[in-house]
Image (tube, grey):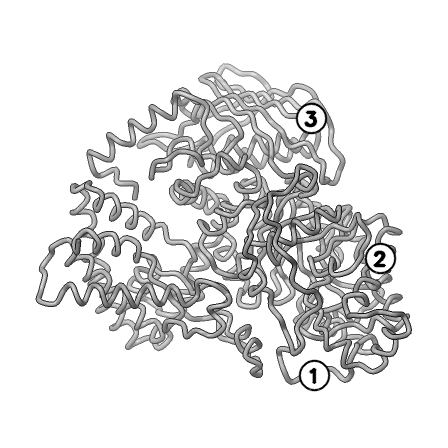
Amino acid sequence: MMLRSLQSARVLLASATLLALSASTAMCATPTVWAEKPVVMPAPSSLQTDGGQTVLPATIHVQWVGVKTPVLLEAVERFHTNLEKVSGKSIKFTELPSETSDFTLQIQSTNTAPRIPSLNMQEHYALTVSQTGATLDADGPIGVLRGLSTLVQLVERTATEAVLTHAVIDDSPRFRWRGLMIDVSRHFMPIPTLLRQIDAMELVKLNVLHLHLSDGQGFRVESKRFPRLHTVSSHGDYYTQKQIRFLVTYAAARGIRVVPEFDTPGHTFALLEAYPQYASQAPLNMQDRAEKNRAALDPTNPATYRFVTSLYSEMASLFPDAYFHIGGDEVVAKQWTQSPHIQTYMQEHNFKKPADMQAEFTRRIAASLTHNRKIPVGWDEITAAEIPQDTVVEIWRGAARTASATAAGHPVIVSDGYYLDRLQPATTLYSQDPLGNVENSAEAEAAAQATGPGGTIGGAVTAQKTPLTETQKSLVLGAEAALWTEIVTPDMLDARLWPRTAALAERFWSPANLCSVETLYPRLAVIQDKLEQLGLDSRANTSRRLSRLAPGETQALRTLLSVTSPVQNYAHNHEFLQIRHKQTATEQDLNTPADSASPDSFDADRFNRQAKAYAAGQEDLRPVLLAQLIGWQANHAAFSASADRNPALKNALPASEMLSNLAQGGLWALDYHRKHGWKRHLRTTLAQAKSDRAASATTKVVTNTPQPAGDLLQDIVPGIEALANKALR
């Protein structure tokens, strides 16, 4: 995978490694195409290594200095298990020195920590690994957890044994809030599925699990005060209160906070299925699926506030974190403007626009949460009118809103640019900094999902053309990756989250000046393998899905999907497009090849790098390129034969043919069995593949542009283009 079969590559790799050993280095700053050793993600603030390695011993002496809490003991046991998984060998841990123990792991934590992690948890750690042992010194128990996550990543296998790389690391996070939002309303995610994500989050040092627990499709938590919420609105899929408490405890043991979101006053169709007396418009439209995104509460009804405050009080008791997310996004204006009694109320209270009405709702709900000792969080629509200054604003509609919210003094969490459901590759997501300033916010505005006639509450803002001030930057608590699950089932979740979430974990933890997109994929491939070893089901679930599409003959499909990716920016969310075009929304099948295609292709990335290196003069790469291209060119015959027997593959036939044509063009560019007209064929094929990619380049383009058949994009286009440019110039 990393060109180690080529002698020239070995020389380059050795040279690069020697350079890496000479100074402190963060792995995301290395300008080579290989995953230099050691690979640690997120990249530590400071890492030094002499290149030395110690054979992982059969017995490790664990020595405690300072506090030793149940959380730490559990963390060490978890580290022990993980160490055996990644090393492939049995290791004994003992707190008693013995003759068989020549390696000591010394853990020093000077402070205890609260039972529940908090925004200001201490996560700094210092780690030294040498021939005789490892020393982990942290400011508190959470820092120990972070250091152990790094230590397990320093383990690798040689040809005959497991080794631990020597290193001196001093590390702390850039942001205090490093989250992952999982929507469990649109598609319910069982507890074991969430536990896998929490374990993966611990390895990459994310510290907030934001659960979107209610929306149009379902309310997902047992309520003893309003039992119809789980007996009616959950449609049979919900978490018991006992399960919620277990989930919170499980996450806390891994230094992860659980922040709940119960969306109001919009996105409340599920709430209103159970309690329709609180609806802005009745009866509910039960026929159009789009209505599940439109229904809103009636903010003029005093009983609505009693209902919401009582519900929030009950839910707040289940989630001990200081922060409580109230949603507040995408309130469809006509839910209120087309209601005569709401219009009368607005006139009586001198509310000039629906945003003023929402602001009143937010203020009243925020006051009730404050009474319950909670800090409210809401999506950026809540800033359309005055709200309490301590309300945390989550930004999803462009960096201009980060600027405006922080200028108004609000703490901010940035999820803009980090929406995983847009199916953008890791490189696109990773290239955006949470403190970045984007002058043109047109794409962010276009991505805002206006879900009905009249649009949603909250207008555009003027982009700030100057960088954030230091005061504004200090108000940015951190950032979150976000996955909305309209087109994500439980067996798709792992693969839709990872490895892209690992890339964003690094963006949120590591110093900005150390992160370079150029070296991301080789390192991401390593961390994805580690995550799979430690329990993720991305590959296992994908294999099962492919077997469902083509039982007994998945190889041709695997080859196609290894170098293709799904269309981006909601182009694959057909229901979203139906809503945008004012059509009756229908549920789509999630058992197509595109549903199992990854937004990231490590195989395509490797090929593209090799092709560009060849075009730049590295001629000895030609045999490697030929071998790959011949395989892709020949795959279409096998795929076509499989599609004849498996109808589920038929919609991907054009994508398979396009891959074959691109590969054939690449072969001709390499002067391999050229035939008359090859230049025209190559140009035409490339133009079509590039046009297919452009069709989902932005959300604005997607709305009115036909997509390639099968919703699949060709990821080897940059490499083929590099070969073509060399051959045609």
Determine the residue located farthest toward the top in the rendered image.
99
SS at circle 3: loop
Relative side of 493 to 376, left or right: left
Callout 3 touching callout 2 (CB < 8 Å): no
Return the mark for residue 720.
none
Write down the residue under mark 2: 313
> Where is residue 280 shown, x and y percent of the image?
79, 77
Q: Is residue 240 visible?
A: no
Relative side of 98 to 366, left or right: left
Q: Residue at x 62, y 79 (%)?
A: 289
Task: Name the residue type under label 2.
Answer: Ser
Q: Residue at x 48, y 45 (%)?
A: 531
Callout 1 touching callout 2 (CB < 8 Å): no
N-term-proximal mark, 3 vs 2: 3
N-term-proximal mark, 1 vs 3: 3
Relative side of 593 to 448, left or right: left
Write down the residue under mark 1: 285
Q: Bin the neighbour count of mark 1 within 10 Å (Cα to Cα): few under 14, some 14-19, many 20 and up.
A: some
Write down the residue under mark 3: 68
Q: Bin the neighbour count of mark 3 within 10 Å (Cα to Cα): few under 14, some 14-19, many 20 and up.
A: some
N-term-proximal mark, 1 vs 2: 1
SS at circle 2: helix
Q: In the image, which is nearer the foreground, mark 1 or mark 3?
A: 1
SS at circle 1: loop
Q: Residue at x 49, y 24 (%)?
A: 59
Q: Residue at x 80, y 81 (%)?
A: 339
**Can you say whether 42 is above or below 258 in the image?**
above
Give the CA separation, mark 1 to mark 2: 29 Å
> Where is residue 703 shown, x and y percent of the image?
50, 72
Q: Is residue 714 visible?
A: yes
**Can you say whether 246 is above or below 117 in the image?**
below
